[in-house]
């Protein structure tokens, strides 16, 4: 049996590595007996052994950037990319220089972007990573170690199936030395302006929207100031708040299920543009269900980063 090479100082085995992993920078990386069947075997075997000379170049390229933030999710479909984009738009609206980069799924491209792109002086570089925990995440963390990555924002939804994967993602961050800046709970209930919703009599199928709005006005309530709320994805185990408390990580906030947020994502723009237009037209605050939560998340994230 081939001897297993020791793990070099500073080279931590990936979270999902086999037992007795020799380490990604060892001479036996990807080739030792302990590497057989490991999901990282091909990456380790083809990667450079010993200190990567490109790490210094990456650190130099990223030096003018004040804050580098990874945006992660334990699984796909939780709105990670939408959340990352809206965070970038909201920060840019606060006169900050922000770039959002959607990390590719190929390790060679990741290194090329980090090393060869002239990023210039930025306040924030948000890296929208692929979902889950994969070779790409391991590569990004390894490449950014010399570049002072600030940490990660982890996106989830309220369901336990998503929360369970986020626990693994937070464990990955801790094992690789990436600070967890906070958790964002996306799709935290449906929130829609009541005046924009249809109302149907369940027994007859008749549209009773105008009747209901009239009754509300007669009762002294302004329909334009009311929000319709509902828990679409029930937080069966307490949702992100319970998980954040259990794992001792900050909860940055939550974004609702909001049609305006969906439109903004499809059109590649900030949801705040639609919210600001509604406010300029005299719409009540109830017509702006995403604006407040998004700005609160940005404020908390910036505060966490300033604590470093």
Image (cartoon, rainbow, N blue to C red):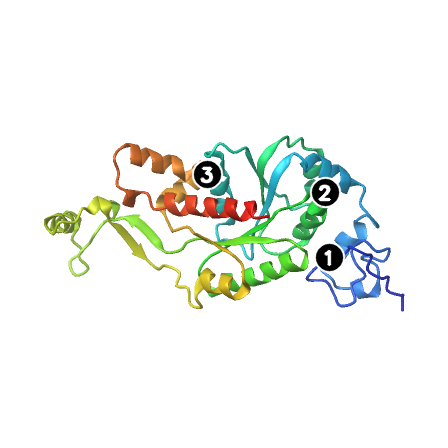
The residue most toward the front is: 307
Q: Residue 57: which quarter of the image?
A: top right
Helix, strand or loop at label 1? It is loop
Instruction: Report helix, strand or loop for mark 2.
Output: helix
Task: Tell me where residue 265 appears, x and y as whole percent.
Answer: 44, 41
Image quarter hosting the N terminus: bottom right
Relative image position of residue 12 (x, y in whole percent) = 75, 58
Q: Nearer the viewer, mark 3 or mark 1?
A: 3
Upstream in the sequence, badge 3 or badge 1? Answer: 1
Hey, which residue is sitting farthest right in the picture? 2
What's the mark number on residue 40?
1
Label 3, secondary structure: give it: helix
Q: Are marks 2 and 1 in contact (CB under 8 Å)?
A: no
Q: Determine the CA span between mark 3 and mark 2.
A: 31 Å
Pointer 3 or 2: first along the chain:
3
Q: Nearer the viewer, residue 66 or 144?
A: 66
Judge left or right: residue 208 versus residue 291. left
Q: Position of residue 263 (x, y in %)?
A: 39, 41
Checking the image for residue 90, the label placed there is 3
Q: x, y (%) of residue 232? A: 36, 59
Characterize the local packing of mark 1: few (<14), some (14-19) or many (20 or more) Cα atoms within 10 angstroms: many
* Disc 2 target residue: 108
Disc 3 residue crowd, few under 14, some 14–19, many 20+, Cα 10 Å:
many
Q: Is residue 260 in sight in this rendering?
A: yes
User: Can you say whether 36 is above or below 180 in the image?
Assistant: below
Of residues 184 and 64, the one nearer the viewer is 64
């Amino acid at each position: 049996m081939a001897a297993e090479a020791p793990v070099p100082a500073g080279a931590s085995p990936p979270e999902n590595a086999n037992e007795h992993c020799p380490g990604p920078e060892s001479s036996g990386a990807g080739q030792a007996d302990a590497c057989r069947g490991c999901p990282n075997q091909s990456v380790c075997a083809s990667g450079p052994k010993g200190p990567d000379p490109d790490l210094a170049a990456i650190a130099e390229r990223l030096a003018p950037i004040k804050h580098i933030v990874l945006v992660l999710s334990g699984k796909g479909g939780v709105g990670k990319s939408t959340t990352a984009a809206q965070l970038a738009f909201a920060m840019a609206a606060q006169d900050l220089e922000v770039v959002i980069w959607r990390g590719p799924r190929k390790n060679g491209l990741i290194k090329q972007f980090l090393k060869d792109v002239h990023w210039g002086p930025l306040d924030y570089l948000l890296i929208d990573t692929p979902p889950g925990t994969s070779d790409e995440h391991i590569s990004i963390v390894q490449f950014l170690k010399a570049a002072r990555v600030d940490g990660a924002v982890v996106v989830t939804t309220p369901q336990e199936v998503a929360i369970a994967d986020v626990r693994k993602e937070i464990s990955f961050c801790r094992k690789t030395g990436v600070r967890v800046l906070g958790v964002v709970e996306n799709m935290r209930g449906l929130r829609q302006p009541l005046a924009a919703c249809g109302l149907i009599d369940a027994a007859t199928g008749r549209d009773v929207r105008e009747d209901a709005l009239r009754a509300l006005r007669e009762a002294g309530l302004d329909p334009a100031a009311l929000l319709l709320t509902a828990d679409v994805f029930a937080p069966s185990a307490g949702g992100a708040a319970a998980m954040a408390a259990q794992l001792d990580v900050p909860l940055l906030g939550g974004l609702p299920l909001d049609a305006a947020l969906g439109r903004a994502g499809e059109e590649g723009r900030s949801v705040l543009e639609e919210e600001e237009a509604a406010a300029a037209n005299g719409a009540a605050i109830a017509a702006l269900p995403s604006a407040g939560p998004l700005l609160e998340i940005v404020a908390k994230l910036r505060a966490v980063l300033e604590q470093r």
